[in-house]
Image (cartoon, rainbow, N blue to C red):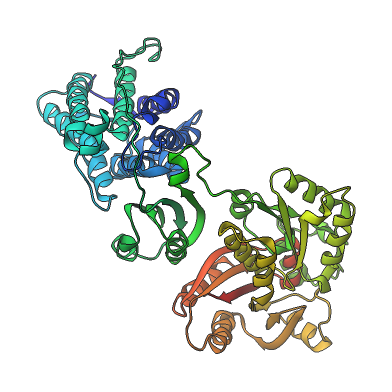
Amino acid sequence: MEELTHKQLQKMILFSCERVERDKEEINKINVFPVPDQDTGSNLSGTLNGVKDAIINKNFNNFRDLGDAALEGALMAAQGNTGIIYTGFMVGFFDDIKESSKINTIDLSISFKKGFERAKDSIQNPQKGTILDVMEAFAEEFTKESEKSKDIVKNFEKAIKKAHKALLNTKEQMTILKKAGVVDAGGLGFLMILETYFDTLIENENPFSKKPKKKVVATKRLVQILTNRYEVVALMRDVSISESDMREKLKNLGDCLDIILVKDRVKIHIHTDDPYIVRDIIRTFGEEETMRIEDMAREVVGEESVVKNQIGIVTDEISGLNEKNIQHYKIESIPYKIDWNGIDKLKGETVAEKLKTAKEEGFKFSPKVIPIDPKFFKEAFKKQLKTFKEVLCVTSSNSYFNTYDIALKGREMLEKDKGKVYIFDSKNIGAGQAIIILKAIDLINEQKNIEIIIEELEDLKVGNIGVINSPFTKKYSDKIKKTISKNRYVLAEAKKEFIPKETLKKDECVDKIINRIKKDLKKNKKSLAVIIHNDNLEKAKELKEKLKALNVLVSFTNFVDPVMSLKMGYKGLMVSYIKL
C-alpha cells in the first residue's frame, strides 16, 4: 500500500476507539504513574469515545475535514493525563496534513513526528518511561523506514516493533514502574491504538476476531502519599493569552500540567492541592466550557473521586444561562410562555428579527409574558431531588412576574421534602440572575452548606448596565418611548426594573457602558461578568474586549431568551458583574 485515504484513516481511528474501550481495564490495572488511581484506561477510552462520536457515520471530503471533527471531539472529551497527551498528539498529527483525500508514507511519517512533538510540548516536565517513549520510537522508526520504502504497511509493521520494545523498556526507565513490575499504562494504551491502526491497514475483515497474545503481569498494590491530590481538567474558549503565559501562571500550583491550545480554545490538565485557586486562574484565560475537579486520593482507595454536588439548581429561563452551563451542572430551567398578539405574523425567524421588523414597519402590538404555573416548579423540584439531597431555586426578580412567589407555591405543592427546597429571589433578571447562579455553583462545588450559600448570595452586590431599544417594557415614560421609537438607544440600569439613564446613539453603546462600570470599579479589582445580547454579537465582543482592560473576566456571552428579548429590544446589550 503506497497511499492512505482519509476514509481508511477514519476507519483506523474508529476501530482504535473500540479497541481501547474493550481493553481499558487491562490498562487500568497497571496504572501506577503519575498516580496509582487505576483510571488511565478509562480516561483514554473516554477521550477516544469523544472522537468516535464526532466522526462515526459521517462523510468527510479530505484529511483536513476529518481532523477538524476528530479534534473537536477530543477537546470536548479529553480527560486525565493520558487523554490530554493523546489530544496533543492528534493536534500535531493533523496540524499540517493535506486537504487531499490521499497521502503517502512520507506525509504520514511527518504527521506521526509532529504528533509526538506536540504531545511532548503539551507536558510541563516530560519524563522518560512514559507514553512519549512509545510515540517517539514509533515516529522515528516510521520516518526512517519511509525514507527507504513507499509501502505504508511494511513501514508500519517495523515501527510497531520498535514501539513495543520502547513500551517494555519503560519499566527500566522509571523506578516506580520497575518496583510495580509493570510497563507504563499510557504507553500500553497508545500501543493498542497503533496495533489497531495496523490491523485495519492489513485489511482484516474483523480486526477483533483474534485477540493478541497477552502476557499476564502480576501487579503490586502501591500506596503513595499523594501531594497535589486534586485533578483539575478544564476546556476554555475565546482564549486571548499565550500558552507560555498560561504555563507561567500555573507552573507553581501543582504538577502534571498539560496544556493543549487549538486556535482560540485550550484544554488544561493539572494536579494540585489548591483546586479552587487553579480554577479561578484558569477562568481568566477565556470563557469556560467545562471544568472538573477530582479528588485522586479518594480514587486511589476506591471511593467516588469526582467531587459530587449535593445541591441541585432550579431557575427560570429569563436567567439567560447558556446551554452548556445548564447541561454541565444539570440545572432545571423553566421557560415562560408569551402571548405574542400578532408578532408571529411578522417576517423573521427569531424574536429579535421580528422586533426589528415591527420597528421598521411601525407595527404595534402588546406582547404579554404569562407567569409560570407553580406546578412546573413542583415538577422541577421533584426531578432534582431524585439526584440531589437539596435544591436551591434562584428566581428572577419577583417584581417582574412574581416568579419568587410562584416558586414558593410550587414548593408547597410537594407532598414531602418541602424542607429540602430553598427559594432565593435573585432580585435580578437576565445576566444579573445568571451571574448569581454562577456564584452559587462555585459555592456548591466548594461543598458549602445551603444556608451559608444563601447568606453569601444575599451579600453579593451585582452591577447591571445595558443598552435597551424596546418600547414594550413597562414603566417607560412617554419621553423614553418616543426616544426609542426614533431609533435611538437608552442606557439603563437593571435592578427591580430597567431604570433609564440617558439616550445615546448606536455607536456610543459600548463606551457608555464601559464608562459606567469604570465609576463602579474604581480600584480596578478583579470582577466576574456575564454579557447577553439580542442579535448584537459584534458589540458584545467589543464590550468583552474592553472589559478585559478593567480586569473583568467574562464568564460567557449569550443570546437572550424571548422574555429578555422583549425587555431589551432589537440589538439590546447587557452586562452584569460582581467583584471577586
In what quadrant of the picture does the N terminus appear? top left
* Up/down of 108 relative to 334, above or below: above
Image position of 546 (left or right of 458) = left
Q: Position of residue 374 (x, y in %)?
A: 88, 56
285 and 166: which one is in front?
Answer: 166
* Up/down of 335 relative to 194, above or below: below
11 and 453: which one is in front?
Answer: 453
Image position of 197 (left or right of 423) = left
> Which residue is depicted at the point 62% across and 74% down?
576
Image position of 391 (left or right of 95) = right
* Up/down of 577 relative to 26, above or below: below
Image quarter of residue 575: bottom right
> Which residue is depicted at the point 54% across and 82% down?
514
- The answer to whether residue 374 is visible is yes
Q: Position of residue 194 (x, y in %)?
A: 29, 26
Q: Position of residue 319 (x, y in %)?
A: 70, 63
Image position of 384 (left or right of 308) = right
- The answer to whether residue 363 is visible is no
389 and 537: which one is in front?
Answer: 389
Q: Position of residue 296 (x, y in %)?
A: 43, 46
> Which residue is depicted at the point 17% across and 21% down?
158
